[in-house]
Image: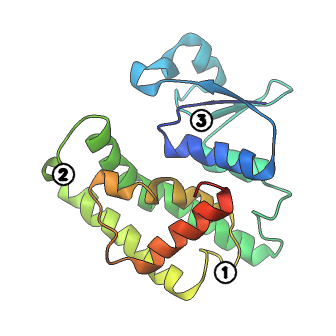
Amino acid sequence: MKIHGDLNSGNCLKVKWVCDKLALPYDWVAVDTLKRETHTPQFLKLNGAGQVPVVELDDGRALAQSNAIIRYLARDSDLVPADAFDAAKMDEWLFWEQYSHEPYIAVCRFLMVYLGKPASDLDADKVKRGYAALARMEQQLAATRFLVGDKMTLADVALLAYTRVAHEGGFHLDGYTSVRRWIAASEQQLGLA
């Protein structure tokens, strides 16, 4: 299996972390998104949307979208709850991550880290929504060790990717003690700490 990705992307790191956690063999194919390497004819044959990550399976099929990829790779593992309701709660968090977390926290980080914008230039609505996402996570993590109970799931992997570097996007985690505890616990589970 080949993972086409950019190590600067949290969405790509999710896939790498799941493979590493589950000891799935892969070859990493570095793709520099800032150099627009996702828009080459060769890459667009793998993913017509021109986005990383893309997993190229041994049989030649390709799968895109980070949460679809990790859901496929971890389908028979402990990262997906056996209980159907808990698995659906995990999926709920995966969808929420892409719609209500990543567009704010990751985008602010991209603007500051890769485009060199100061925090004062960030869109106030994106910052407000980023803090709202952190507040929702804080509320859940004050009640449970991980996002879906006491065991790490793909929801934790997905949300860890950009939450652990939220400070790089101007978000301060000082008031989010449960989120900070969860970051440390999740990093430890994934061997990142």
Q: SS at mark 2?
A: helix
Marks 3 & 1, CB-CB < 8 Å contact:
no
- How packed is label 2: few (under 14 Cα within 10 Å), some, or many (20 or more)? some
Residue positioned 86% across, 57% down in the render: 76
Task: Give coordinates of residue 1: x percent, y percent.
Answer: 79, 30
Residue 119 tag number: 2
**CA separation, marks 3 and 1?**
28 Å
Lateral position of residue 60 relative to residue 86, left or right? right
Lateral position of residue 92 relative to residue 24, left or right? left
Residue type at mark 2? Ala
Q: Which quadrant holds the C terminus? A: bottom right
Residue 184 tag number: none
Total numbered labels:
3
- How packed is label 1: few (under 14 Cα within 10 Å), some, or many (20 or more)? some
Disc with the residue nearer the chain's start (1 vs 2): 2
- How packed is label 3: few (under 14 Cα within 10 Å), some, or many (20 or more)? many
Residue positioned 53% across, 60% down in the render: 159
Q: SS at mark 1?
A: loop
Marks 3 & 2, CB-CB < 8 Å contact:
no
Residue with the mark numbered 3:
53
Snapshot quadrant of residue 77: bottom right
Disc with the residue nearer the chain's start (3 vs 1): 3
Residue with the mark numbered 1:
149
Mark 3 vs mark 2: in front: 2
Residue positioned 30% across, 61% down in the render: 171
Q: Please tell me which residue lies in front, 84 or 82.
A: 82
Task: Give coordinates of residue 48: x percent, y percent.
Answer: 58, 25
Q: Is residue 155 above or below residue 179?
A: above
Task: Give coordinates of residue 139: x percent, y percent.
Answer: 45, 83
Residue type at mark 3? Pro
Residue positioned 61% across, 80% down in the render: 145
Residue type at mark 1? Gly
